[in-house]
């Protein structure tokens, strides 16, 4: 059994690893180096990696609690398992493809303690080159924003409040601000609030689970805040190697989010915008490939996505589930670090 301590602590840091061996170890090194003001534990769930992640983590970081699973539970369910074992008063979800900068975790927890009026907290993310990565938070999706994204208006008019509203108007994440969605790569919440919300909905295998949780929190009058002083590097997409599979997972998660939080007619429209998104890219790259050979691969990829569109076609009338029963964390046992 790999564990740090048996008493209550300030913070439980949860990392879900899947074939990100070197990145996960680098992330762990950075968080231990940069987190000096808190008592904390680290819980890592390895989702059946095949690259030796669990072995490498166990060897280099014997002080953490490692659960090496022989099954890929997905991001939502794996986090639920980990948090069910957490001893901290606060929970921080941290992606394995991140680097903690300049005491970011200390700063984010201090910020959370100062702002008792809010429930969920996020920070500021950067790309590897130091430029702002705006994906630390998002605005709430609407049928209009889904349509704008699907036909490319959000790309053409990037950061436009009208045509790209989910980007929150080009705001540089450099001030304290209430937002609709805090991204799960750097996501802080009190343990009792997580429990009261029943954690992530495991129907979201990967993507959109944090959006769903933020929306449910808002229905209970809870707020999400961004702390601009807490900064990390987030590389993004490290565990997804096949672009078509990544997009289909994203589209299915979006469709589930539409069904769960929009009325049936709006949800159906939202699902059609995903079809339009795939079709417009396929047609666009289909034309571009005649002028640029580099576009051939993209065209073939979007053809594959278009042909698999039934994978995100969810019936709004039958798939909506407003109960919290299926969101209760599954039991998680720790025996030799194996789930």
Image (cartoon, rainbow, N blue to C red):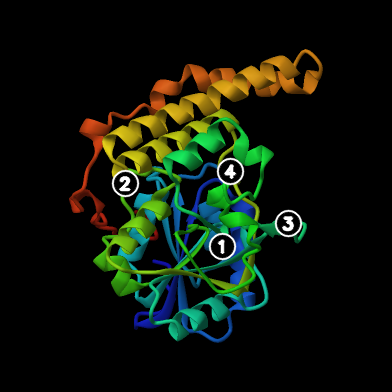
Q: CA distance from mark 1 to mark 4?
A: 49 Å
Q: Which residue is mark 4?
A: 163
Q: Which mark is residue 59?
A: 1
Q: Is residue 233 shown above or below 39?
A: above
Residue 21: tell me if it is visible.
Answer: yes
Image x and y of residue 233, in percent: 66, 61
Quadrant assignment for the C terminus = bottom left
Q: Are marks 3 and 2 in contact (CB under 8 Å)?
A: no
Q: Are marks 3 and 4 in contact (CB under 8 Å)?
A: no
Residue 334: tell me if it is visible.
Answer: no
**Residue at the image position 35 percent from the left and 56 percent from the top:** 215
**Residue at the image position 42 percent from the left and 55 percent from the top:** 210
Q: CA distance from mark 1 to mark 3?
A: 27 Å
- Give the secondary structure at mark 1: helix
Q: Which residue is mark 3?
A: 128
First in sequence: mark 3 or mark 2?
Answer: 3
- Using a 10 Å C-alpha cutoff, classify the residue at mark 4 as few (fewer than 14 neighbours), some (14 to 19) or many (20 or more): many
First in sequence: mark 1 or mark 2?
Answer: 1
Given residues 54 and 112, the one toward you in this image is: 112
Image x and y of residue 169, in percent: 60, 55
First in sequence: mark 3 or mark 4?
Answer: 3
């Amino acid at each position: 059994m790999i564990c740090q301590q048996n008493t209550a602590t300030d913070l439980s840091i949860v990392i879900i690893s899947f074939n990100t061996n070197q990145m996960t170890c680098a992330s762990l090194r950075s968080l231990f180096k940069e987190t000096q003001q808190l008592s904390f534990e680290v819980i890592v769930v390895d989702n059946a990696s095949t690259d030796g992640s669990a072995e490498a983590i166990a060897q280099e970081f014997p002080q953490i609690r490692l659960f090496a699973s022989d099954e890929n539970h997905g991001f939502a369910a794996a986090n639920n398992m980990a948090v069910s074992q957490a001893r901290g008063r606060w929970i921080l979800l941290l992606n394995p493809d991140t680097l903690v900068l300049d005491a970011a975790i200390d700063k984010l927890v201090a910020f959370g303690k100062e702002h008792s009026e809010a429930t969920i907290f996020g920070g500021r993310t950067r790309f590897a080159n130091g430029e702002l990565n705006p994906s630390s938070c998002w605005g709430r999706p609407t049928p209009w924003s889904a349509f704008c994204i699907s036909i490319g208006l959000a790309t053409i008019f990037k950061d436009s409040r009208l045509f790209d509203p989910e980007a929150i108007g080009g705001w540089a994440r450099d001030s304290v601000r209430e937002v609709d969605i805090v991204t799960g790569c750097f996501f802080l919440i009190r343990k009792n609030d997580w429990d009261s919300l029943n954690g992530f909905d495991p129907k979201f295998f990967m993507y959109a689970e944090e959006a769903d949780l933020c929306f449910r929190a808002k229905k209970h009058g809870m707020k999400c805040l961004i702390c601009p002083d807490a900064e990390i590097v987030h590389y993004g997409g490290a565990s997804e190697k096949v672009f078509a599979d990544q997009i289909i997972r994203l589209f299915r998660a979006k469709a589930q989010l539409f069904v769960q939080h929009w009325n049936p007619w709006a949800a159906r429209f939202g699902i059609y915008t995903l079809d339009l998104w795939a079709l417009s890219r396929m047609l666009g790259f289909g034309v571009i490939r005649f002028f640029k050979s580099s576009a051939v691969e993209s065209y073939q990829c979007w053809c594959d996505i278009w042909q698999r569109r039934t994978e995100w076609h969810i019936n709004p009338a039958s798939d909506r589930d407003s109960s919290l029963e299926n969101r209760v964390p599954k039991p998680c046992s720790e025996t030799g670090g194996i789930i």
